[in-house]
Amino acid sequence: MPKSLKSKKEIVRIAGKLKEIITVKDEKGNILHKIVNPLMVEFRPRDILQIIIGASILAIPVGFTEETWNLARTLPLTNILLFMFLSILFISAFAYYNYYRDNFKQHKFEFLKRVLSTYIFSFIVVAVILTLIQQTPWNTDSVLAFKRVVIVAFPASMSAAIADVIK
């Protein structure tokens, strides 16, 4: 059994995708093992489709309930904005721990792009769905419409973030 093992991490692009290669060597420098892991820090167009589908998964059942429509009507705008902030905070934490924890410094822009895109696309999906079922009175009460979209976007953005992990 070797007395000391050394490992080396490097990031390379293979077939257009980033990979992390971990090389394990013994004390003589002989390669014992190489591990290749996908490094999912780049935000790609296919991720947008996954976000849209993921947001739809919870936007449809939550958006079709009268309880959420009434909740948006009764909650003050401050609480709604806090829901928006919480959504972005949860997406950020989830993305950080699933993609960027070990490579955050090199991929800050990709992190920001992923978090904002996840929330914005979730918001748009919810807005479209609620508009189609005529629960967003944009012309007569745009604040209520906005509040309803934010309330439903809270769970929708969580499911979008989770769907984005599926590769």
Image (spheres, rainbow, N blue to C red):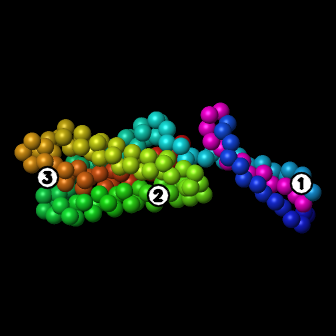
Q: Quadrant where the N terminus lies?
A: bottom right
Q: Is residue 135 visible?
A: no
Which residue type carries mark 1? Answer: Gly
Which residue type carries mark 3? Answer: Leu
Expressed as whole percent of the image width and height from the top left, the position of residue 164 reads: 46, 46
In this view, which residue lies farthest toward the bottom?
Answer: 3
Q: Is residue 116 left or right of residue 144?
A: right
Expressed as whole percent of the image width and height from the top left, the position of residue 59 reads: 29, 47
Which circle marks residue 29 in the picture?
Answer: 1
Which circle marks residue 75 in the picture?
Answer: none
The numbered mark, 2 or 3, whose residue comes first in the sequence reads 2
Q: Quadrant of residue 19?
A: top right
Which circle marks residue 94 in the picture?
Answer: 2
In this view, which residue lies farthest toward the left?
Answer: 140
Q: 40 and 163: which one is in front? A: 40
Q: Which residues, given as a range, are shown in magenta?
A: 15-27
Q: Is residue 89 above or below residue 121?
A: below
**Secondary structure, magenta segment, majority class:** strand
Q: Secondary structure at mark 1?
A: loop
Expressed as whole percent of the image width and height from the top left, the position of residue 126 reads: 27, 45
Which circle marks residue 144 in the picture?
Answer: 3
Q: Secondary structure at mark 2?
A: helix
Q: Is residue 56 left or right of residue 144?
A: right
Instruction: State the CA–CA distance, disc 1 to disc 3.
Output: 66 Å
Identify the residue at horizontal 19%, vertical 54% (top origin): 147
Q: Secondary structure at mark 3?
A: helix
- Name the mark nearer the viewer: 1 or 3: 1
Q: Quadrant where the C terminus lies?
A: top right
Expressed as whole percent of the image width and height from the top left, the position of residue 33 reads: 81, 51
Identify the residue at horizontal 46%, vertical 57% (top origin): 94
In this view, which residue lies farthest toward the right?
Answer: 28
